[in-house]
Image (cartoon, helix red, strand yellow):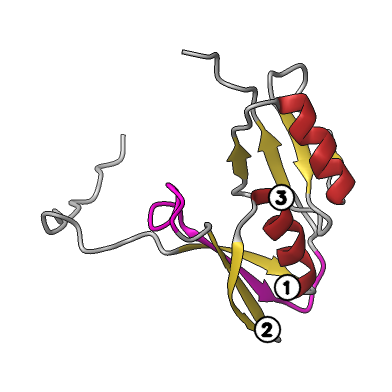
Amino acid sequence: MTDLPTIPTPPSPPTLRWQCVCVDARDPSLIAAFWEQALGWRRTHEEDAEVVLEPPAGSPEEGVCPDLLFLRVPEDKAVKNRLHLDLRPLDQAAEVARLEALGARRIDIGQGETSWVVMADPDGNEFCVLRALPAE
């Protein structure tokens, strides 16, 4: 058995904040347009090499959810993501259909029979549409 390294105790409260999820893209503006429509988020910064999306101003997600930062890279996506987004809809079937109309597609990554739908955005980045939570 390997000894685990000693990990320093973070300051209390921790001083790090999760700012954004970075997504590599051949065309940041194009893929940001998909996610802007999919999530109903707003573009808060745009340059040729990067686009930032944030939740709508005044929404419950503003200041809570990390931003999405789309960064220009020269290469196409080649393998399965090591990190992906899980989205919780009110109506799974309706949201899957809407996302397909925006350019997403259902994909099979070997998930088998599940309660969620695995999809890919127009750049091939995987994400999941979870089942709706039961009404309380």
Residue type at mark 3: give it: Ala
Q: Position of residue 53 (x, y in %)?
A: 58, 65
Q: Position of residue 5 (x, y in %)?
A: 23, 50
Label tally? 3
In the rendered view, would you say 90 is above or below 134?
A: below
Q: Quadrant of the N terminus?
A: top left
Q: Are marks 2 and 1 in contact (CB under 8 Å)?
A: yes
CA gap between label 2 and label 1 equals 7 Å
CA gap between label 2 and label 3 equals 21 Å
- For disc 2, the marked residue is 49
Q: Position of residue 50 (x, y in %)?
A: 64, 79
Q: Which comes sooner in the sequence, label 2 or label 1?
A: 1
Q: Which comes sooner in the sequence, label 2 or label 3?
A: 3
Q: Tell me the number on the disc at residue 38.
A: 3
Q: Are marks 1 and 3 in contact (CB under 8 Å)?
A: no
Which residue is pictured at 86% across the width and 42% down the height? Answer: 100
